[in-house]
């Protein structure tokens, strides 16, 4: 597995630097600075960032065992099973049952994993002597996280946001204002994340000398996909330590939602080379830890109204990178759709495209409707309101847990004396953000019903 | 005539090149043909025809809106090459973004260009590092050059790489920013032109230099093309000037005048011709 892109900034055939000439020198300078401060042996940058992550962002975030959710999945399977213990509720997680753990990135200051990256990049911007940072935002979470990091590190901040998203994510617009950032509405194209990125690049082209463009996901021209992945790796690093401590072994399955792919790549990266039976004795080679990304199927993949670049896209160049895109046959970029603005993007990070292409990461998609059910389930079962983006991952994890519980039950009957752990399925979901920002749009969808 | 020959022929006449840009299909494919003819009548030497892309990151709001409208009106690559082929007796250059070239297939794109009489392709999101595949194809087609851009931020090292690959002309980006009219000509143009000329001397190969981005007025064309007789400090002595958004603005104003009646269109075409003429006069340096 490539841990670093090649000299051209490519992961296999994906990635690269398809940027206007004006920016090429800035990208080279950024790469140099990143190498100097992050990839080299130099300790002080990492120490400073580590301190901010601990004392400001609230890391490490907990890995939470979602007992109620796990029981619900196991319970469903037993009810559908032979029917012998159909009334067996509140029986705890049965042997052969499935355990779902949530990596609580929703507890990071600001309410999403985004701050991991913005603190890292704002610190880098400072070291590079820039006085101003700009950022694009879809859901508003990256905008808020940039505004926070800029405030705490004393940088001027301007956030570009599509007018469509400004309507959908009002609370975050207000938060950015409170944090001292300027929010610039983008009224071109589809008026969402894609267009906010276009406008940020245009601003950067104009102000490249004193401005740092702080990209919020593992997208864009090299070295951004690498930089953002490196700053998000902390999610997977902690998760691995925590699951080993809690369960004494690695998970069978790790799930994360994918828009641009930053929380997914940050979570998956540490597990890329791992086998699930590592740290266990007496087992044969074992399987790799399954890594599954969940994209937005929107109104359904077959309707064309979705944000699933990896599940349903084709290869092309957008926003400085060669990756998988939603486009027509001429190469015009299609409008993506999802009710989760953070997943409403017609492209995806090149490294993730590479990992999916090579078969290491599998992709699934969840519709708005399925996601909404998962949103409600997690809220009522665990008292956690997830971001609509993260609820996509929850949906898949729940479905998969139910399926695995059913399968485990069958296996149990066949070979009762098999070791419990072998049948037990450990699932970790990256809960990338909290859903406070979404309550108004969910209310609108539900039309005053439900919840 | 290929592009370098065209610049050479103009030079022998004591002229610099006026490169005029317009978005194909704005507001319609038929209109583009008429607009192009008006530009040529007015004195445009090289016609740069934009093939619109949904996400034009190097363009300011004027060309963005023209691109959006053109796409809505049904412009696509097939139609584009048809329109381009219909505009004759002028050297044409295609400006577009890399994804459109990639999806058509590099080979097909370049051969379509050649068949339509397009002498050069400008791709603002294709820096020299990524240009190898397209450059290889262009090399096999004698009549079509890949045009590279150079910006004020381009380092000496990058400049050397670009000039090594350059043919047709070099598109000199006058400022840090996107396309669109500006009040004054950026002070970075003159030093940038001098820098490129110096490198060209070292490399032993001279490719014409045309300056674009932000140029919208006759006096700006004069400063870009001027040889320094009047003002050595600001005159850049480039081989040509590229004007785009200013033409789009005239079309936009024509459309805004309301009913897309024939009278309005005629007036708009007359304005385009006159404007092109006013720009062309400033390139007659002899």
Image: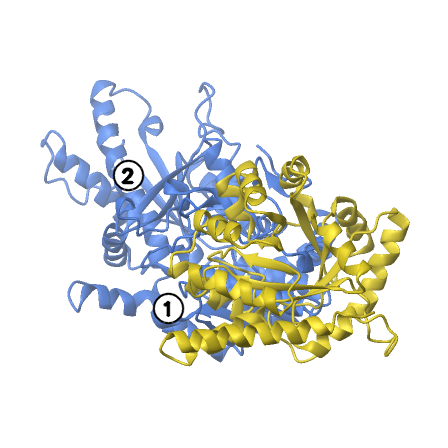
> Chain B's colour?
yellow
Marks 1/2 in contact by CB < 8 Å: the verdict is: no
Please name the residue that numbered disc 1 is placed on: A164
Name of the residue lying farthest toward the right: B202
User: How far from the left and from the top, in percent, is residue A232?
Assistant: 54, 51
Query: Nearest the camera: A120 or B110?
Result: B110
Query: Nearest the camera: A20 or A1?
Result: A20
Q: Secondary structure at mark 1?
A: helix
Numbered disc in front, either 1 or 2? 1
Q: Quadrant of residue B198?
A: bottom right
Chain letter of the residue carrying label 1: A
Q: Which chain is blue?
A: A
Counting residues from the N terminus, which is met first, the one under dot 1 or under dot 2? 1
The color scheme shown is by chain
Tell me the CA gap for discs 1 and 2: 35 Å
Q: Quadrant of residue A70?
A: top left
Chain letter of the residue carrying label 2: A
Please name the residue that numbered disc 2 is placed on: A401
Rendered-image quadrant of the C terminus of chain B = bottom right
User: How far from the left and from the top, in percent, is residue B280?
Assistant: 69, 70
Give the residue drawn at x 57%, y 49%.
A225
């Amino acid at each position: 597995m490539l841990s670093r892109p090649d000299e051209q900034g490519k992961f296999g055939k994906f990635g690269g630097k398809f940027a206007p000439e004006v920016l090429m020198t800035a990208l080279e300078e950024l790469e140099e600075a990143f190498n100097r401060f992050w990839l080299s042996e130099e300790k002080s940058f990492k120490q400073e960032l580590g301190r901010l992550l601990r004392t400001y962002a609230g890391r490490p975030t907990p890995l939470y065992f979602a007992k109620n959710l796990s029981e619900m999945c196991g319970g469903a399977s037993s009810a559908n099973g032979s029917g012998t213990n159909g009334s067996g509720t509140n029986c705890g997680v049965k042997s052969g049952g499935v355990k779902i753990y949530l990596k609580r990135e929703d507890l990071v200051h600001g309410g999403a994993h985004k701050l991991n990256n913005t603190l890292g990049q704002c610190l880098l911007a400072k070291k590079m002597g820039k006085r101003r940072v700009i950022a694009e935002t879809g859901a508003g979470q990256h905008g808020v996280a940039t505004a926070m990091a800029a405030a705490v590190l004393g940088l001027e901040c301007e956030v570009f946001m599509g007018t469509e998203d400004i309507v959908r994510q009002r609370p975050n617009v207000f938060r950015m204002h409170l944090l001292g950032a300027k929010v610039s509405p983008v009224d071109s194209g589809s008026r969402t994340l894609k267009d906010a990125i276009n406008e940020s690049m245009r601003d950067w082209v104009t102000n490249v000398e004193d401005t740092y463009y702080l990209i919020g996901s593992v997208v864009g021209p090299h070295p951004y996909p690498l930089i953002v992945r490196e700053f998000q790796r902390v999610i997977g690093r902690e998760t691995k330590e925590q699951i080993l401590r809690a369960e004494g072994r690695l998970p069978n399955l790790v799930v994360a939602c994918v828009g641009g792919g930053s929380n997914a790549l940050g979570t998956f990266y540490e597990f890329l080379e791992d086998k699930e039976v590592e740290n266990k004795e007496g087992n044969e080679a074992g399987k790799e830890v399954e890594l599954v990304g969940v994209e937005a199927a929107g109104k359904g993949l077959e309707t064309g109204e979705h944000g699933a670049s990896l599940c349903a896209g084709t290869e092309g160049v957008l926003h400085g990178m060669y990756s998988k895109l939603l486009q027509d046959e001429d190469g015009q970029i299609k409008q993506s759709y999802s009710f989760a603005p953070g997943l409403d993007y017609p492209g995806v990070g090149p490294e993730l495209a590479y990992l999916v292409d090579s078969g290491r990461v599998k992709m699934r998609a969840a519709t708005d409707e399925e996601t909404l059910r998962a949103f409600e389930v997690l809220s009522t079962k665990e008292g956690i309101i997830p971001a609509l983006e993260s609820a996509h991952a929850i949906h898949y994890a729940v479905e998969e847990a139910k399926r695995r519980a059913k399968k485990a039950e069958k296996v149990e009957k066949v070979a009762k004396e098999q070791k419990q752990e072998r049948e037990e399925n450990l699932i970790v979901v990256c809960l990338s953000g909290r859903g406070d920002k979404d309550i108004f749009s969910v209310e609108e969808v539900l039309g005053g019903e439900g919840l | 005539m290929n592009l370098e020959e065209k610049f050479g022929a103009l030079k022998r006449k004591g002229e610099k090149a006026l490169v005029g840009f317009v978005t194909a299909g704005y507001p319609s494919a038929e209109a583009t043909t008429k607009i192009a003819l008006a530009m040529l009548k007015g004195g445009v030497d090289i016609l740069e025809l934009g093939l619109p892309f949904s996400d034009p990151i190097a363009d300011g709001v004027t060309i963005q809106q023209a691109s959006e409208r053109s796409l809505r009106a049904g412009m696509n690559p097939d139609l584009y090459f048809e329109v381009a082929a219909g505009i004759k007796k002028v050297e044409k250059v295609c400006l577009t973004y890399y994804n459109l070239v990639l999806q058509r297939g590099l080979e097909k794109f370049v051969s379509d260009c050649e068949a339509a009489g397009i002498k050069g392709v400008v791709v603002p999101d294709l820096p020299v590092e990524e240009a190898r595949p397209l450059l290889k194809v262009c090399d096999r087609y004698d009549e079509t050059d890949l045009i590279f851009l150079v910006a004020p931020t381009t380092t000496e090292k990058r400049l050397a790489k670009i000039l090594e690959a350059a043919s047709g002309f070099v598109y000199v980006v006058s400022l840090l920013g996107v396309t669109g009219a500006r009040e004054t000509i950026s002070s970075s143009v003159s030093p940038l032109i001098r820098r490129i000329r110096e490198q060209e001397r070292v490399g032993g190969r001279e490719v014409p230099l045309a300056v674009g981005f932000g140029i919208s007025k006759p006096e700006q064309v004069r400063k870009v093309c001027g040889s320094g007789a009047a003002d050595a400090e600001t005159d850049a002595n480039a081989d040509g000037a590229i004007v785009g958004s200013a033409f789009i603005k005239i079309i936009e104003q024509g459309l805004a005048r309301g009913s897309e009646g024939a009278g309005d269109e005629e007036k708009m075409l007359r304005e385009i011709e006159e404007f092109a003429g006013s720009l062309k006069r400033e390139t007659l340096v002899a």
